[in-house]
Image (spheres, rainbow, N blue to C red):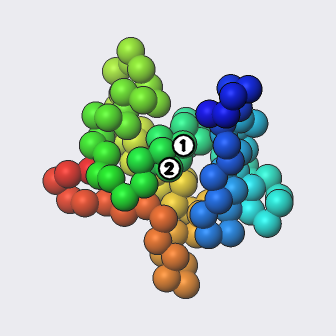
Amino acid sequence: MDARGVLPALAFGPFVLDRSHKQLLEAGRPLHLGGRAFDLLAALTERPGEVLSRQALEARVWPHTIVEETSLRVHISALRKILGDGVAGARYIANVPGRG
């Protein structure tokens, strides 16, 4: 966060994650991303290279809420699809079985 309280945008691959405006851009074009999926992506980009547990992600995105086990999978799947994860060798989100 800068001195004005504005979160800096993050660039990765062809994407820019504008956290202040809650937008994901590809080549300057906004992509449709739901609020929960955006929050998941923001959480993942805040700790690049770290393995985040399901519990940590759920606590961040769904605080004070009981979450169906499939909810996280559905939103991660949506993120992978919009990011083209796995297409032409691009890998943005990795799953470590048994860890997160």
Counting every numbered tag in the picture gives 2
At mark 2, the secondary structure is helix
At mark 1, the secondary structure is helix
x, y percent for residue 15: 67, 62
Q: Disc 2 vs disc 1: Cβ atoms closer than 8 Å?
A: yes
Tell me the amino acid under the disc marked 2: Thr
Q: Closer to the camera, 18 or 74?
A: 18
Whether residue 71 can be seen here: yes
Q: CA distance from mark 2 to mark 1?
A: 5 Å
- At a point 73% along the width and 26% down the height, the residue shown is 4
Residue extending farthest bottom: 88
x, y percent for residue 28: 83, 60
x, y percent for residue 47: 41, 47
Residue extending farthest left: 98
- At a point 68% along the width and 69% down the height, the residue shown is 14
Dot label at residue 16: none
Dot label at residue 42: 1
Tell me the amino acid under the disc marked 1: Ala
Residue extending farthest front: 3
Q: Is residue 59 left or right of residue 74?
A: left
Q: Is residue 93 left or right of residue 16?
A: left
Q: Residues within 10 Å of mark 1 (few under 14, many from 20)?
A: some
x, y percent for residue 45: 50, 50
Q: Which residue is mark 2?
A: 45
Residue extending farthest top: 64
